[in-house]
Image (spheres, helix red, strand yellow):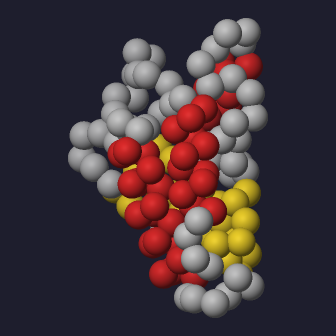
Amino acid sequence: MTDQTTTGGDVTDETATPWTAETLLAVEAAVLAVPGVTDLYRPRPTIGSAVAAVRRLAPGAAGAGPAGARVGVDGPVLHLVIGTDGSAPAPAVAHAVHDAALAAASAAGRTPTRIDVRVARIG
């Protein structure tokens, strides 16, 4: 499920504030708390997320380390890959994951421009 969450959202240039480890962990926890979600997988990296990952590995970088590693970030875009238990239709679970991730990011002061939710495994 791909959704254009906001028309403006966060800035995507090099001056954009990086996602913090706490925010990514909050999104991860919110996604895993959605009924029907059994797993959250690390998404395939995009060019932007690969560059951001290298920056996070730099000593002293904000968000360094494995925290929130199962939430893909590409500028203001979140990429989530989930497994479901089959108790509810996968599209409904994906929509609930989108809403939970948006709420968690918004509570941390971030507004993703898009949240991509992909279902890798059903039941």
Residue found 46% across the figure and 61% down from its top: 100
- Count of picture labels: 0
- Please provide percent x and percent y for residue 5: 33, 54
- Please provide percent x and percent y for residue 65: 74, 27
- Please provide percent x and percent y for residue 122: 71, 81
- Please provide percent x and percent y for residue 68: 66, 41
- The correct choice, above or below, for 104 with respect to 12 in the image is below
* Residue 93 shows in this picture: yes
Most extreme residue toward the top is 59
Q: Quadrant of residue 41?
A: bottom right
Towards the viewer: 2 or 71: 71
Left or right position of 22 against 17: right
* Residue 74 shows in this picture: no
- The correct choice, above or below, for 13 with respect to 111 in the image is above
Towards the viewer: 89 or 7: 89
Left or right position of 6 against 23: left
Residue found 24% across the figure and 47% down from its top: 7
- The correct choice, above or below, for 3 with respect to 74 in the image is below
Residue found 57% across the figure and 88% down from its top: 88
Residue found 56% across the figure and 35% down from its top: 22
Most extreme residue toward the left is 7
Quadrant in which the C terminus appears: bottom right
